Image (tube, coloured by chain):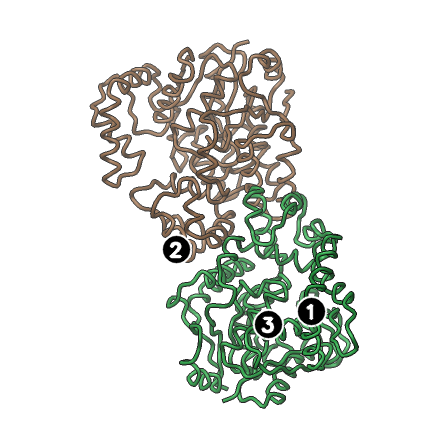
Chain colours: A brown, B green
């Protein structure tokens, strides 16, 4: 059996994702689709709208065959680390190819850019350092440094978010397994960051979440999501009374910031020199997450970077903990599978280079502890009795099996 | 001007406290009454019903002239440490005498017991160690060891809570200033721990709080409190929409426990060997503070001791922090004063051995940082917009001046 890998957050799974899954299978002529999906906290430093279990169901019901959790240590990270973790896992799962969405839509551009950048690495790094010194944010520095190199017409435009991620996938694969095949599909209609609807059936997850948050009304988004997603969102809202948004974690973030000193705060991952004073000061004066974020934002750090930092404070993730971990995922946590997925797993399980974890109690590992903690903290976005109900899931929920 | 000292929590200030203030002044023939009062967290490991500012107003309006905060590092502690901090501060404030309530009511019994115990110190300590080894709680071990010494009829009964505290006051004074005069009044009618009302005008703070928590109705308790207390409770409930109870801090305690590892938990003050596993396990399964407490309770630790431990976890108070502090209060934080109190302060201020702190921004100190943190954490018992309102008090509220 041949499998194709997808990197996703499915927050929530929408029609664009459905198109991506189908295209991935078709382009790569695979029997099985494997998604590596972020857990409860996402790359942009946000809690997922609904739990990883609910998002796994959406994916399986829309044609994904296997869902593997991207560990917290890779999920809440900048693009390089995120991409490395995801590609490592897809390669470990024996995918022969990987398909991603991009603004470019032309895989040759990515491959060309990889060798172009490889040739100019020293110059590129020098430019990055120079821009960082000028107080420019890291992602902007990368984009500007790339411009300085004078990319030719065959290069990919590295100023758009999905092209950037795609480039990092290709880059990671060059290290992990150069034989991986890559496919890219052009994103249809909706831009990654689009906040409003512009197409009749395809919308970005951002615009879908925005609409959900503003109106809490599922009917407004149903044109943009498979009916399986709609059913799962309905189910979640009936099981847990609400979705997860940053504002509901704000009291905990504020509480933690006000009950730690500067030295302790400096031990948290991604808290860089000088940030600790601004964080503590803003925690005293802000009365919600958005005003807190506005108070700490500066030119040097992107909003996304600061949100990730807030997630690390919230989950009490320390520099020493992250630095002591392996640079690649040490396990593949199985969140769910279809019948075909199960068949595939049976076929490859003896060749897996890392353990396939389906039961938490059977496996102990420092990297996994971060995932468990993230789940525990994630549950605190809910009030009782829902909090406790969700807390119990992390240990008791076996991988979801979709028999459809 | 002559002053008398009182040690109190005023949670809330009731008719028994009023009687105590008046008797203290009369017995000691003093012009000024000075209360050392616990801040927002109390000796029994509980949040105070209302903030220290509101309780200061109650005290001043009922005849106390000066209110000094007992620092967190002494307030949330076993009787010895609590008593040492309080007596040290009253002595620093130049009190010539100290008056406390007791079940005994006979100061000679305390003084006799002090010398009796002094003679038998080695034997007493040996008995304590023996009982502790048997898995008996520390306070019970003290009481049993005392019984083993065979106290005579002139000794005080050290099995009741106010006699125990009184004994520690007298004991602390022997170290700090043996010239301090002591007075004790017998507690009228209500036992310290009584949970129901038995007298027409005197009730324990415990029974008053219990009635407030159960019915939230101030009319039921008005016979037992001065009308100034009633007015302040009304004001608090109108300003902040609620009183402070442990259950409202439970989500934060649980969140903290679920986002720290065992090593970090062992760094918290009073977390002793072996407790960390029970704490983390119970945090996973409990859905409220009371069920959490029941899950962690064993014979070895009293309920009070475990509640104090929970306060230290909640406020992130570490062993290293407490151990690095001076063994006595380093400042006297002024919470409020009457006109006479102000006159007295003007008279003694040049002789004070420690700084009198009326403005937080003017003084920096590690011991004081714990008080500020306790206030920040205390505010999290409230929802917004009340949380932010209370947070602002700690830095902005000058000492309360009661001009009546």
Q: Earlier in the sequence, mark 3 or mark 1?
A: 3
Q: Would you place residue A225 above or below residue B309 in this image? A: above
Chain to which mark 3 belongs:
B
Q: Which residue is mark 3?
A: B172
Q: Would you place residue B208 above or below residue A63 in this image? A: below
Chain to which mark 1 belongs:
B
Describe the element under mark 1 as helix, strand or loop.
Answer: helix
Residue A341 shown left or right of residue A287 in the figure: right
Alpha carbon distance from label 3 to label 2: 40 Å
Q: Which residue is mark 1?
A: B206
Q: Which residue is mark 2?
A: A281
Q: Residues within 10 Å of mark 1 (few under 14, many from 20)?
A: some
Describe the element under mark 3 as helix, strand or loop.
Answer: helix
Q: Residue A63 is drawn in which quadrant?
A: top right
Between residue B89 and residue A133, name the one nearer to us: B89
Asked whether residue A123 appears in the rendered view, the answer is yes
Between residue A279 and residue A15, name the one nearer to us: A279
Q: Residue B249: x percent and y percent? A: 59, 56
Q: Residues within 10 Å of mark 2 (few under 14, many from 20)?
A: some
Chain to which mark 2 belongs:
A
Alpha carbon distance from label 3 to label 1: 26 Å
Q: Are marks 2 and 1 in contact (CB under 8 Å)?
A: no
Q: Would you place residue A184 above or below residue B138 in this image? A: above
């Amino acid at each position: 059996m041949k499998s194709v890998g997808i990197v996703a957050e499915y927050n929530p799974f929408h029609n664009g994702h459905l198109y991506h899954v189908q295209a991935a299978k078709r382009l790569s002529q695979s029997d099985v689709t494997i998604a590596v999906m972020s857990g409860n906290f996402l790359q942009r430093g946000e809690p997922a709208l609904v739990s990883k279990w609910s998002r796994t169901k959406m994916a399986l019901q829309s044609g994904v065959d296997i869902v593997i959790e991207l560990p917290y240590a890779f999920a809440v990270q900048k693009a390089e680390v995120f991409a490395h973790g995801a590609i490592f896992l897809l390669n470990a799962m024996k995918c022969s190819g990987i398909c991603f969405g991009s603004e470019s839509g032309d895989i040759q551009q990515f491959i060309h850019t990889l060798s172009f950048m490889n040739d100019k690495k020293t110059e590129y790094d020098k430019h990055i350092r120079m821009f960082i010194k000028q107080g420019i944010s890291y992602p902007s520095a990368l984009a500007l440094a790339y411009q300085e190199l004078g990319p030719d017409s065959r290069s990919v435009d590295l100023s758009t978010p999905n092209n950037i991620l795609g480039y990092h996938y290709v880059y990671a694969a060059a290290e992990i397994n150069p034989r991986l095949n890559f496919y890219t599909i052009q994103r249809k209609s909706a831009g990654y960051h689009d906040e409003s609807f512009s197409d009749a059936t395809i919308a970005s997850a951002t615009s879908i979440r925005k609409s959900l948050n503003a109106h809490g009304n599922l009917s407004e988004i149903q044109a943009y999501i498979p009916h399986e997603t709609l059913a799962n969102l309905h189910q979640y809202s009936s099981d847990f009374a609400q979705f997860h948004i940053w504002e509901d974690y704000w009291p905990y973030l504020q509480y933690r910031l006000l009950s730690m000193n500067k030295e302790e705060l400096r031990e948290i991952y991604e808290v860089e020199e000088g940030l600790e004073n601004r964080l503590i000061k803003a925690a005293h004066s802000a009365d919600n997450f958005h005003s807190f974020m506005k108070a700490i934002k500066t030119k040097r750090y992107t909003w996304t970077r600061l949100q990730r930092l807030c997630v690390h404070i919230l989950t009490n993730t320390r520099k020493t903990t992250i630095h002591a971990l392996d640079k690649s995922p040490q396990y593949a946590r199985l969140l769910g599978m279809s019948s075909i997925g199960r068949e595939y797993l049976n076929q490859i399980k003896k060749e897996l280079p890392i353990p396939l974890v389906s039961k938490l109690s059977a496996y102990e590992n420092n990297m996994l502890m971060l995932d468990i903690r993230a789940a525990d903290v994630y549950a605190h976005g809910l009030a009782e009795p829902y909090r406790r109900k969700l807390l119990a899931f992390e240990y008791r929920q076996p991988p979801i099996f979709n028999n459809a």
